Amino acid sequence: MPQIETGPFEQGPLTPVEAAELEALYAAAFPEEDPFPLVRRLHEEVPDLVSLKAMAGETLAGHIIFTPCTIEVLPQVRRPKPDPDAAPSSQATPAALLAPLCVAPEHQRQGIGSALIRAGHDKLRSMGTTHVLVLGDPAYYGRHGFAPGSNVEPPCPLPEHWREAWQWLTLDPSRPEPNGILSVPAPWRDPALWAE
Ligand SMILES: CC(C)(COP(=O)(O)OP(=O)(O)OC[C@H]1O[C@@H](n2cnc3c(N)ncnc32)[C@H](O)[C@@H]1OP(=O)(O)O)[C@@H](O)C(=O)NCCC(=O)NCCS
């Protein structure tokens, strides 16, 4: 098995070579979805994006993104219809949204996904971000400390049976999770990303 190394993508738009490699990786890992247009937009539009790759030798074997967001503390806790366009409040708390994550099928079950999550968490800690949110399989993310029952509403309403998939993690247990709504940058505001 080749040695796996994780490292960051440069800030800003992807180069044509990076885009081609990532597009092929996502097509292989997600045969029934196409997250790559979102990946491209995030690179183009979001400053301070945490975009990490895992290399197996010269081959791109995995990728993860953490998008910098804020938790907006709203006057009414648990609003029935979260407003992702709510104006930032002075009480905003930095947070990160984990997604997407993928590992090439031939490199799965070698610890690459776990290594990418750990590397991302280390980077977030260095940025002073301690709250992480994810919409994903609890069976996988639960292994990494994520749990359902977040006090933070997702930016768009979720199907009821996805509530358990909306999970949170704090990288600093001394800082409790605030109540609020996750305010996300534009590429994440498409309701289709939050629905079946
Ligand atoms: C999910 C994914 C990122 C895991 O990457 P990975 O490098 O294989 O993960 P790791 O090697 O760190 O961990 C593998 C372990 O997680 C388990 N696992 C993988 N996906 C899982 C899931 N959805 N639910 C529960 N366990 C899962 C594996 O069975 C394996 O268990 P084992 O250690 O007992 O053998 C990878 O399988 C993938 O890219 N899948 C397709 C895209 C995807 O679903 N992305 C996540 C979107 S939420």
Image (cartoon, helix red, strand yellow):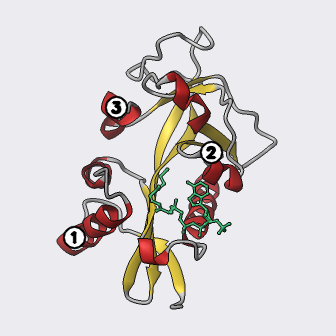
Q: State which tag comes first along the sequence, 3 or 2.
A: 2
Q: What element carries label 3?
A: loop
Q: What element carries label 2?
A: helix
Q: Can residue 105 be seen in this view?
A: yes
Residue in the image at 51% along x and 72% along y: 108
Report which quarter residue 150 is drawn in: top right
Quadrant, the N terminus: bottom right
> Which residue position is annotated with label 3?
189
Of the two numbered discs 1 and 2 in the rendering, the one whose residue sits closer to the viewer: 2
**Disc 3 marks which amino acid?**
Arg
> Which residue position is annotated with label 1?
20
> Badge 2: how crowded within 10 Å, few (<14), some, or many (20+)?
some
Q: Would you say 122 lies left or right of 160 here? A: right
Report which quarter residue 18 is drawn in: bottom left
Q: Where is residue 83 in the image (x, y as percent from the top left)?
A: 43, 17
The answer to which of 185 and 164 lies nearer the viewer is: 164
Residue in the image at 52% along x and 81% along y: 5
> Which residue position is annotated with label 2?
138
